[in-house]
Image (cartoon, rainbow, N blue to C red):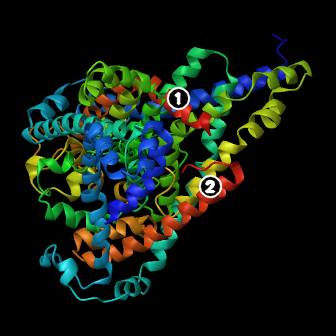
Amino acid sequence: MLKRTKEDYVIETVIYLSLLFILFVTVYPFYYVLIISFNEGMDAARGGIYFFPRKLVFENYASFFSDSKWLNGLYISILSTVAGTFLGTFFTTMVAYGISYKDLVFRKFYMTVLIISMYFSGGIIPYYVLLREIHLLNTFWVYVVPGALSIFFVLIGVSFFSQISPSLRESAVIDGANEITVFLKIILPISTPFLATMILFIGVGHWNNWFDSAFFVRKKELRTLSYLTMEVINKSQLGANMSAADAGMRSSKITPLAIQSAAMMISILPVICVYPFLQKYFVKGLMIGSVKE
Amino acid sequence: MTTDFLFADNKKEIRLLHPVIQHRVTDGSEKIVLIKTLAKQKYLQAFVLAGMAYLFVFSYLPLIGITMAFKDYKISMGIQGIFSSDWVGFKYFLEFFNEYGFWKLVRNTVAISLLKLIFSFPIPILFAIMLNEISFMPVKKLVQTCSYLPHFISWVIISGMAFAFFSSSGVINSIALKFHFINEAIPFLTDANRFWSLAVVSDIWKDMGWWAIIFLAAIAGISQEMYEAAEIDGISRLKKIWYITLPSIKGTIIVILILALGKLFGGGLSGSNFEQSYLLGNSMTSEKSDIIQTYVFNVGLAQGRYAYATAVGLIQSVISLILTFGSNFFAKKISGEGLF
């Protein structure tokens, strides 16, 4: 190691300070929502809370978990995330595995169909008409069925499965296993990096979904947590300094902003818990992609 | 039948891959061989056909629905209406061009993407270089891991945070007022002239760490020998960055830049312009926050002008498609490889 020059120290100081700034700017908004969600609503409306809750209370969360509207939203979000991720991951992997087989008859045709649908879309209105005609509008299934196949991940899967040695499959077939057994017992267990990346992206996509709820669903009992959060944010945006007098609030100490913060934290929490464990897969996966470039 | 054509297309592949089949193919019993091969792959074929059926319904049927952009279609007509309604040619397209807000929509759509290209594009590169320059791994890991958390957070949450920080009673205004930097609250969220900055800043905040991953990967691919040689020659840190790191990742930078150009009309590199404008924009900022994508929603789903909204959406997708393929063509020419 060579001696550090004065320039090195200057550069490193600048870099460390910049990274510290980036770290603060990235993390602080999350932290701020956290402390507001644990502070009494009326008190938080007075402002001046930056680092710690001034009046620590749990009633914002208590009120979230005792409101049937929010509980139902949470339930719908969990259900659609679990069902959608399971179906999406399974179906996408299946199709990708099938296409990745090099001797598959009509393989080129299938690839063409896939790539065309990636670049050409009918746009939102024909899509809406379609959902209406196949009676998916206003049902729970509109969250799950239309997203069951991710074209992007089919393509990633095809290149992933192509790297798996064909002999693995062949030897199992010779031993008398059929394709379904091979797929479930041999291919899926060794596909962790691909599956993990896909589960993360498809899962987060479902969890964050407010869009389908806003445009394809009218029934109140089908709203997702993300949609309800958006609704309450828009409401508090309209009456900027709205007080607790806002109709519908049970306790006078709970403001829309307080309950909004609690809802935001509940939406953020699963994502924060999941992504650090999966990051090694998606960072690696992306790296492979760009090294190939 | 189309299958004959497909079969002919696939014959070459079968021949190349199966020496045994090749022998039989020359015997002229092609159909039998095909059926046998298909029977062997029946499960795999079933997997893929299920996917194709899905694509037919959810991707190809909406493509047929585009015809309503040229027809006098009303939603009350049902699905048959798409075929039975009268042709009106380019009526809706002309209607859009003569629309009062037409230029405003085009301006906002392009300006927001372009501003993001200018301001949010260089920052991940700078961030990746900075991360690469520090040798203390725990800090590097911590900063990087935190930096792409916002990528996984929805725009709904970000609009809530924007409200908490930028509203007239939000954190930024409160602090600035307290220390007398300003005399009255700045209306970050309700002043139309500030919307573009808000869009760019929130975009940087959300996706800086995410895009840095790609550039970090490119930097990781640079041969260490170059740096070692430079060190022996006593070349300074800044010069190493300027003469080794940057030129080595030039290819990646150009590819991503050109792809971003392709997304100019489509919704920005991260495809986030719709959600941003819809969730961060409001009636007071609509002069600067309305883009073609939000317009399609408003006239289509809210006002029920389906045929007209389809036409507007079609114009946008056609321009996007031209830009995407065009930029990819140039990416291929320059770097030897595009994304498709």
Q: Tell me which corner region of the image, top left, top right, bottom left or bottom right, holds residue A128.
A: bottom left
Tell me where residue B148 appears, x and y as whole percent: 48, 33
Amino acid carrying label 1: it is Leu
Disc 2: which chain?
B
Tell me where residue A263 appears, x and y as whole percent: 23, 37
Residue visible at 20% across and 33% down?
A82
Q: Quadrant of the C terminus of chain A?
A: top right
Q: Is residue A212 left or right of residue A292?
A: left
Q: CA gap, disc 1 to disc 2?
A: 29 Å
Residue A268 seen in this snapshot: yes
Disc 1: which chain?
A
Q: Residues within 10 Å of mark 2 (few under 14, many from 20)?
A: many
Q: Is residue B11 above or below residue B265?
A: above
Q: Is residue B134 above or below residue B22?
A: above
Residue sitting at the far right: B233
Q: Is residue B340 left or right of residue A182?
A: right
| Residue matched to label 2 | B258
| Residue matched to label 1 | A23
